[in-house]
Image: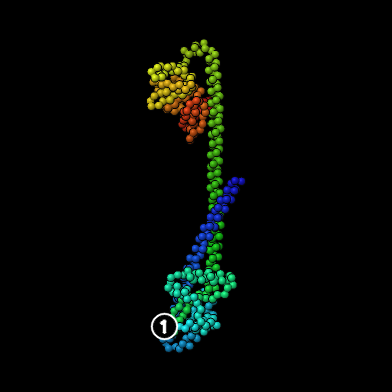
Amino acid sequence: MRKDKLYFLTFISIAVIFLIIASLGINYFIKISVNQLIEVQLEASKREADEIASLVNYEFINGLDKNTITQNLQNTLNDSNKGTSFVSVFDWSGKTVCHPDITQVNQKVNSNQNLLESLKDGSSLNKLYDLLIDHKKSKETNVTQVESEIVYISPVKSSDLIIAAHTNLDKMVTQIVKLKRRYYTIFILMGILIILASFFAVRFIGSYYEKQLELKNTNLESELINLSKLNMDLVAYQQKIAANETEEAQKPTAVEANTNNETNKIRLLTYIRNELVPVAINSIAYIYTENTITYIVCTNGSRSTSNSSLDEIFVDLQASLFFRANRQFIISITSIKKIIKYGNSQLKILVEDADVEIIISKHKAAEFRKWLNI
């Protein structure tokens, strides 16, 4: 249940992050694309207006009268305002001479002069973009506005006529709406793919690490069981040794008779300062070396030194009671308090009534288990 909740929250988080990024980026991309569309449309309108102005100028140079030229232009321009751009003709007084909508002929030109000036200077396309957005909002609120705007003018040199390039606002707005729909469709499809791909990737990676974690937990559980068994066997072995010592204590004669036959010593000769002190081997907790000096620590906490090395002392100790843990320590079975896992397959030995930790390496651990008769 927790996994399903985690995956669900992951899915929601990815979706929210994508929506935030998309909402910030989509308007920027749309505006850039619309400005490119406007720029292309303006260039095409300018080229058309300049070509018509050159043609009309050529006709005036060849002696055609103004009425014939304007009549020919009107016949050519009739119903040419169906696309995103068209041209019209007006004179210096601002009266329309030719227009695709014949009802506009002889009417005063109505256009945004600030827009025309800014586009003429090439300083900004944002004004036309804002105009198109305002026109779209006006249509949505049923507010009547002009249907076209003059975006470029090209005077005819040999007359008082001016060729005007118009942008059909309705058609441009329709193109912008189509462009927005395409962007939104692309973002939605891309978002679905990204979210689903991310979700399944997270789920796959999560499942993989869950399996690894389960395997690790299984191995850890196995190690804990083995460690628990190791400590139980340690306690059993210590009890067995204690029972054997009690039996031997009750038969002193037999012990004395057997002492001469044993190869192992029952005591070690040590030093406390300058005094020679014999120490019973069965009272030793552990033996260690530090700064080339060998120290012998008894179960009662007393400490003495020896001139012998750990190797020389270990030869005289009973193998079933003492274990060479590492180069620095020899440990007695009776002084072991607890065995715990340490590091990578290593063991740490805690000693009874002593603030000392003895580390058994990975390679020595198997020998230690065997020593405990496991």
Give the class, few, some or many, for how many residues have Cα within 10 Å of label 1's Cα (few <14, many ≥20). Answer: some
Q: Residue 289's x, y, as percent?
A: 41, 25
x and y, in percent, of residue 170 in the image: 54, 73
Relative to 10, say whether 314 is above or below. above
Residue 33 higher or lower than 55, as above or below:
above
Total numbered circles: 1
Of residue 30 and residue 324, the one placed in the foreground of this image is 30
Q: Is residue 349 above or below residue 142?
A: above
Horizontal and vertical percent for residue 279? 45, 18
Residue in view at x 56 percent, y 57 percent: 192
Give the answer, above or below, for where 95 lies relative to 357: below
Q: Is residue 174 visible?
A: no
Question: The disc labelled 1 sits on which kind of residue?
Answer: Lys
* Residue at disc 1, secondary structure: loop
Q: Does residue 239 show up?
A: yes
Q: How is the image coloured?
A: rainbow
User: Mark 1 sits on what residue?
Assistant: 157
Q: Residue at x 47, y 76 (%)?
A: 113
x 50%, y 69%: residue: 130
Residue at image x 38%, y 18%? 274
